[in-house]
Amino acid sequence: MDMFVISSILVACMLVMLISGVWVSLTLTGLGVIALMLVENSSIGLLLGTSSWSATTGWSLTALPLFIWMGEILFRTSLSEDLFQGLAPFLSKLPGKLLHVNILSCGIFAAVSGSSAATAATIGRMTLPELARRGYDEKMAIGTLAGSGTLGLLIPPSIILIVYGVAAETSIARLFLAGLLPGLLLIVLFMAYVIITSSLKKNASKVNDEQVWTRRDKLQAFRKLFPIATLITCVLGSIYQGIATPTEAAAFGVFGSLLISALTGNFSIASFRDSVLGAIRSSCMLGLILVGAHFLSLAMGFVGIPRALAEWIAGQGLTTLELIAYLTVFFVILGCFLDGISVVVLTTSVVMPMVAQAGIDLIWFGIFLVLVVEMSQITPPVGFNLFVIQALTGKNIFYVARCALPFFFMIALAIVIITIFPQIALFLPQLMTAG
């Protein structure tokens, strides 16, 4: 059967299953079965069994449930309140004042959560009511939360980077380090936008926030930040220094988050049970998706679609920049209808040969892919962060999307910057390799 016909049938089947509400994991597995049937391969059961085993027995994958559990534990603490109170005294002099707390709180929480939705929901519960009470512009408050909430996808430990590392057979430790500087770049771009906008619109909102912070207040605020700052430093520092693997660092992170939970008075048998159940649900969902993705990748190899597509791309004579531009549009559109992890596992088997053909570094491409997925998280109609913030505010989803639009363009600017200066993503991983 012609390759174009097979590809068209598979795309049509995928759309029908996803629109029908079939689980992503079952959609991936089903597509693999259909692909093998189209090329008359009779070893479907054997291939599914072997691919399922190899997809779930990799040691690097054990970091996934541990980092998810760490985030679930901290989600049930007073961390968001401590972050707000701890950061507020140090940001009161900047134009935009406590709007920066939204951005930095999301950045810090992302460094221990790894989840975009958990970051937006946890920080938003604390900051949105407080910013509203103090008279901050509602659009800016919602926009900063929507944009900064996506940092959970990029700043390590990132769940989606672990999934990409497993799917692309790339070092998770190097991916974590690669995400640090682009994550800081995004924070700087977000804060710069708030500073410029607030400076140009000094009287745009009646902000009731003239509190004077003493040196003692700042010292007390720093104490609130100390536990979480220590946890982040130990988890990421142990990976960077080569003291621990990502899995070992994740285990330490779980212990540290339990300790923080106990010290802040949030630990209870009920919260512990809820954190375990939440981690199990998320880990099982991701595990099933990875099994389906691995089977689909194997089936695609038998069909020959990745090889044919790579050869077609090579025959088009596209430059690297043109390929990146096309992939950006493709991933943003796909991300409007699927969550970030599904985008990664659905496309890895097809896209990786194209990327390799173009000579693009897989570590850099992982960061690029996550940034594009971040854009899709605040793009209607199915931007996942938009739904989270809609639930928090009760606003129309398109109103939330308009508030988030400037931060969509800030992420696009970050993609342009790391494309022009790829060392922003590659500098720290290269230091690790050199060490």
Image: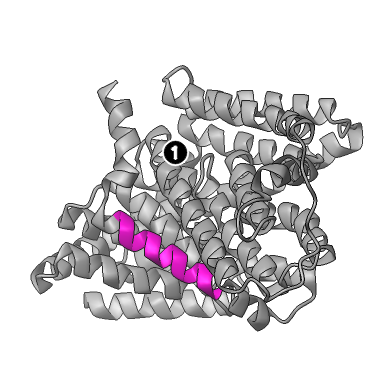
Residue 204: quadrant of the picture: bottom right
Q: Secondary structure beneath disc 1? A: helix
Q: Which residue is mark 1?
A: 176
Query: x%, y% of residue 400?
Result: 66, 76
Q: Is residue 408 visible?
A: yes
Q: Quadrant of the C terminus?
A: top left
Q: Is residue 58 visible?
A: no
Query: x%, y% of residue 11?
Result: 40, 76
Query: x%, y% of residue 384?
Result: 62, 67
Horizontal side of 412 relative to 320 (left or right) equals: right
Name the residue at 78% across, 56% down.
210
Relative to 289, say whether 231 is above or below.
above
Relative to 226, say whether 121 is above or below.
below
Q: Quadrant of the N terminus?
A: bottom left
Residue 407 lies in the magenta-colored region: yes
Horizontal side of 342 relative to 1 (left or right) equals: right
Residue 378: quadrant of the picture: bottom right
Q: Residues within 10 Å of mark 1 (few under 14, many from 20)?
A: many
Q: In terms of depth relative to the viewer, which is nearer, 68 or 138?
A: 138
User: What span is colored magenta in the figure?
Assistant: 405-418
**Amino acid tagged 1:** Phe
Name the residue at 34% across, 45% down.
425
Query: x%, y% of residue 247?
Result: 53, 28
Relative to 277, say whether 243 is above or below.
above
Horizontal side of 264 relative to 315 (left or right) equals: right
Name the residue at 56% across, 27% down.
233
